[in-house]
Amino acid sequence: MGMLSEFKQFAMRGNVVDMAVGIVIGAAFGDIVKSLVEKIISPLTGYLTGGIDFKERATELAKPLIAGQPPLVVGWGAVLQATINFIIVAFALFLVVKAMNTLKKKEGATPASTPEDVLLLREIRDSLKRS
């Protein structure tokens, strides 16, 4: 029975639950970004670049020394395409986070109340000025 209660205590700790919620929300957020990239940004980028796909681009550096061996080929296109995809995804993520932060600022626009210690210090200051 001790192991079961220990597991329950572990599973119900605040940070474990927060982490689980973060993972689920992160997966849903990933779907939003993926959809934005695949359905909006990538088609626009493809249109602007004329549909160029760099994945198959490569450079042959050397002929094989031994007959039957393949030549030495550097596939730089795949790296370039992955870099372009990363930049597109990062930009889409930036746009989504920026929009969410804008909504969050509008929602939390109420002025914060002054902390008690600041109010107390103001009272002391005013009291000293009167003396």
Image: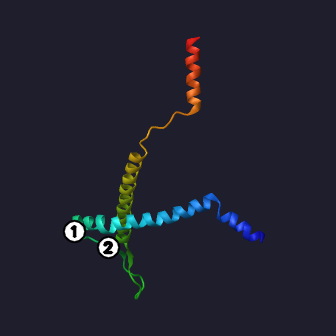
**Percent x, y of residue 7:** 70, 68
**Percent x, y of residue 106:** 38, 46
Query: Disc 2 designates what residue?
Result: 57
Disc 1 crowd, CA 10 A, few/some/many (<14, 14-19, 20+) = few
**Percent x, y of residue 42:** 30, 67
Report which quarter residue 84 is drawn in: bottom left
Q: Secondary structure at mark 1?
A: loop
Query: Disc 1 designates what residue?
Result: 50
Q: Quadrant of the C terminus?
A: top right
Model colouring: rainbow
Query: What's the residue type where badge 1 is placed?
Result: Gly
Disc 2 crowd, CA 10 A, few/some/many (<14, 14-19, 20+) = some
Looking at the image, residue 110 lies above or below residue 17: above
Looking at the image, residue 62 lies above or below residue 99: below
Looking at the image, residue 68 lies above or below residue 40: below
Report which quarter residue 96 is drawn in: bottom left
